[in-house]
Every structure is written in C-alpha cells, then in structure tokens.
Amino acid sequence: MIPNTLARFKLPRVSMLALALAVPLSASPLLAPPAHALFGFGSGPFIVYDPTNHAENLLTAARALEQINNQISQLQNEAQMLINQARNLTSLPYSALTALQQNVDRTRTLLSEAQNIAFDVQQIDQMFQQDYAHIPLSSSDAQLLSDARTRWGNTVGGLQDAMRVQAGVVGNIDAQRAQLSALVGESQSAVGALQATQAGNQLLALQAQQIADLTAVTAANGRAEALAEAERAAAAEQGRVQRERFLTPGTGYQPGSAQMFHN
C-alpha cells in the first residue's frame, strides 16, 4: 500500500518539473534574436536568412542605382547641350566677301569709264541741251556736220560701253560659279547654326552681286539705246532745219558787171 501511495505522490512532482522546463520554451519567441544574429551550434556559427529583409535591401539598392543612372543621364544631356551651344557659336571659316567686292568694283569701274556722256544726271542734261535739244536755223553747214559727228560718236561710244559692261559681267560668271560651289559646300558641312547662317548670308550676298551685274548691263544697254534714239531724233531735226533753209527764198538774181578778158 505504501509504494502505491508514493507513486501517487511522485506523479505530480514529475509534472511540475516538466511544466517548469516547458515554460521557458514557450516564452522563447519573446526573446528571439534578430534574423541576422549568429547562433553557435556545434563547431561554428551560421546566418539566419530573412527573405523579406533581403528583398527590401535589393529594392533599396535598385532605387539608389536608378537615381545614380538618372543623374548620369542628366549630366550627359547637359554636356551635350554645352557641346551643341559651342558648335552653334562657331564661326564659318570661309568668307567670299572679298571676291564679291572685287566683282562689284570691276563692274563699277566699267560703268565709270563711259565715253562722252557718263552716268551723271547733270552731265546728261548739259550734253543733251548742247547737242540734241535745239539746232539753230542759223547754224552753218560746217557746224551742223560737226554736231552730227558728235552725236554719232556718242551713239557709237554708248554701244561700245554696253558691250564692255556685258563682257565684264560675263567674266564674273566663272568667279561666281566657284564662290557658289564653295558656299554651298560650307553650308552643307556647317557644324552649327552660326555657320549655317553665315553661309546663307554669303549666298545672299552672291545673289545681290549677280543682281548688281544684271542692273549694270540693263543700264548700259538702256543708255546705248537712248543715245541711238536721241541721235535719230536730232538727225530728223537737223534734216528739217536744212530743208527749211533750202526752201527759204533768197534775194534772187542780181545783175552785175562782168569782165571777160584781161587787159
């Protein structure tokens, strides 16, 4: 009877011991170390892997890398913008201004060498008043002949001047063709807006020089035609004067003494 009683009293003692040992195990999650803590089991430590923490770390690193890449792209864009600005401010290394001015000066020289009657308003008025506007009825035949020769010389000189200007303008064509080819090449190979604009301005200057040559030819041809028309008009007026003088009755025949034989 006694052993049974002792056995009955020992069972609760064993249960209390098991309960005492179980309590720390159940409370252990409250004291658990972090995921990266090291635990020693056996011969060495090992790392506890936390997927959530690892994913967050990767996401943070990816965002930081993306921000760095954006900053690098922004710096590259700013550098390219500065390069483009430098190109746009680069001046054109070619200039056709001197050659164009030489062509214009050559044509102006030909116009200034106009014979007898220059391209001057006052001189034109004076010469026309003297040789074309009025032919006096009392002029002698010698004076009429001299005036006609002067007008003829003006007409021939005007025609020659027109041909000289035409020859000079034709001589400018080869130089203009070379300048046009060079300017078009510079425009196509321009590295910036400034070079393209300067090449375009020089092309406009070349066009203006060609228009000036065309104006000079038109003026020279018009001058020659005007002199020819003025000569015809003056010749018609001189013919009228000579015809009027011929048809004007004279004093008639006046008898006088005549000596037929010498003493």
Image (cartoon, grey):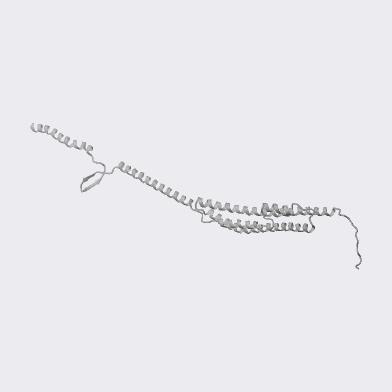
Q: Is residue 224 above or below residue 61?
A: below
Residue 186 vs residue 55, the one in the foreground: 186
- Kindly tell me whether residue 222 is visible in this rendering: no
Residue 172 drawn at (x, y percent): 62, 58
- Kindly tell me whether residue 129 is visible in this rendering: yes
Residue 29 vs residue 142, the one in the foreground: 142
Q: Quadrant of the C terminus?
A: bottom right
Residue drawn at the location 83% of the way across and 54% of the way down: 245
Residue 261 vs residue 41, the one in the foreground: 261
Residue drawn at the location 43% of the way across and 48% of the way down: 78
Residue 41 drawn at (x, y percent): 21, 46
**Number of marks in the rendered image:** 0
Q: In which quarter of the image is the N terminus?
A: top left
Along the horizontal axis of the image, is 215 left or right of 81?
Answer: right
Along the horizontal axis of the image, is 188 left or right of 164?
Answer: left
Residue 42 vs residue 259, the one in the foreground: 259
Residue 212 drawn at (x, y percent): 62, 53
Q: In terms of image quadrants, where is residue 107?
A: bottom right
Along the horizontal axis of the image, is 262 left or right of 180?
Answer: right
Along the horizontal axis of the image, is 192 left or right of 144?
Answer: left
Q: Residue at the far left: name it.
A: 2
